[in-house]
Amino acid sequence: MEVQRIGVVGGGTMGAGIIQTLSSFGFPVIFKDVNETLVTKCLDQVDRIYSSALKKGKLTKEDVEKGLSLIQGRTNYDGFDRMDLTIEVVPEELEIKKRVFVELDGILKPDAILASNTSALSITQLASFTGGNRRPYVIGMHWFNPAHVMRLIEVIPGLETSDEVVEYLLKFCVKLRKVPVRIKECAGFLVNRVLGIYVNEALFMVGEKKKPVDIDRTALSLGMPMGPLSLGDMVGWDVIYHANQTLYEEYGSRFSLPQVLAQMVKEGKLGVKTGKGVYVYEPSPDGPPRKAGEVESSIDNSTLKELSERLLLVWINEGIRCMEEGVAEAKDIDQALQLGAGMPIGPLTWADDLGLDVVLSGLERWKSLYGDRFWPSPLLKRKVNAGHLGKKCGKGCFNYES
């Protein structure tokens, strides 16, 4: 098994970053989009990424020229029958992906790997849209935005994905100087699952009339690169709604959707792209839209402590649940959430630092006030009962030498 030629279906923002990454490592890439306008737009995006890397001294002029020469864009599947790996990067809608998988199944050579960049949909279900002989070659390959910058790639086998394909794709990601993490198939996989419950909690706070700037400041005080509400405005609340609805359908009441989320989507307050989300945005002549109105926080220390504990405990608890379910190895859970979500330290290490008994008592306290979304992981309870309390006793989510 050796990948030499790569196809990409979908040339949006993620597609452009993936195409640039692949071509920069010397792989010929053919990509498809639905019309010539979108093909040209994608090529322009790739050119801008290369130009930026050239200006920063990360690539030479020769590197840029070679990379761009390896890319071909088109509106049909011409040449895809020769691809060794094809990455699907179309919108996160099941019917669109189904159509693409059915089309590709009839075109790709029998041993070509078919990878989906889906962030939440079932790999097993996507594979079911192909014939039985194709299914061992279908796998999840979830990049993070911007794809040419972010190092993490979640690699997700479906029920019928072959071990050979999994091992090869993990090694292939390393060739791209990425950090692959093997993820057990589940709704939201790993990073988006933990981020989902964290963003939900921030929205519940909005519903309680907490000031958005205070909520975002709380996240920054924990070491996050941006606040959850600013993140949601950037990603788009419609995107988050559909992703978190999938999490609710899979995991139940712990992922109940905040009423404010559905209301924003209903009113078209989707974030930066519509000029209004949690915040209001105004055009900027020399860059992306900027927040208008109140952007300064005046949160007091008592409220900051309360909000930070709530945000921290929901993501720690979900990280422990992922460990309990075998979604990924413990060290990979921490690494993935640092690389993919920007956490200053992983949730499992954070739990061990705080003390698992402290985490459990905090979750129980907030559960009595807010219900199931703070329901402690059964594994957390077992560890506390066994005296595995974290670094202070040498054993918690990890073992520590004295």
Image (cartoon, rainbow, N blue to C red):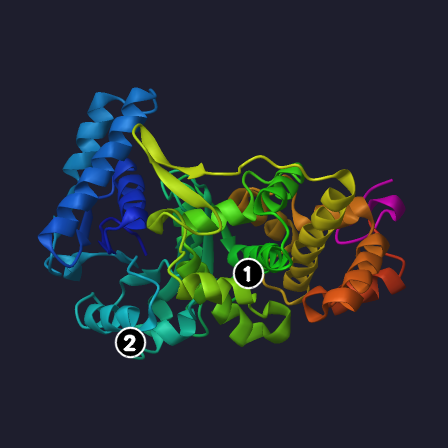
Residue drawn 64% across and 67% down? 325
- Residue 144 visible in rendering: no
Q: Earlier in the sequence, mark 1 or mark 2?
A: 2
Q: Residue 386 has which mark? A: none
Image coordinates of residue 283 in percent, x first then y, are: 33, 37
User: How packed is label 1: few (under 14 Cα within 10 Å), some, or many (20 or more)?
Assistant: many
Image coordinates of residue 101 in percent, x first then y, are: 26, 70
The stretch in magenta equals 391-402
Q: Which residue is mark 1?
A: 193
Residue drawn 64% across and 69% down? 254
Q: Is residue 21 above or below residue 256?
A: above
Query: Most prominent secondary structure in the magenta stretch?
Result: loop
Q: Are marks 1 and 2 in contact (CB under 8 Å)?
A: no
Q: Secondary structure at mark 1?
A: helix
Kind of residue at badge 2: Thr
Q: Is residue 401 above or below residue 3?
A: above
Q: Which residue is mark 2?
A: 130
Classify residue 45 by image quadrant. top left
- Nearest the viewer among 43 and 263 is 263
User: How packed is label 2: few (under 14 Cα within 10 Å), some, or many (20 or more)?
Assistant: some
Direction front: furthest residue = 293
Tell me, yes or no, whether the highlighted magenta stretch contains residue 401: yes
Of the residues tagged 1 and 2, which is closer to the observer?
Answer: 1
Side of 64 relative to 294 (left or right): left
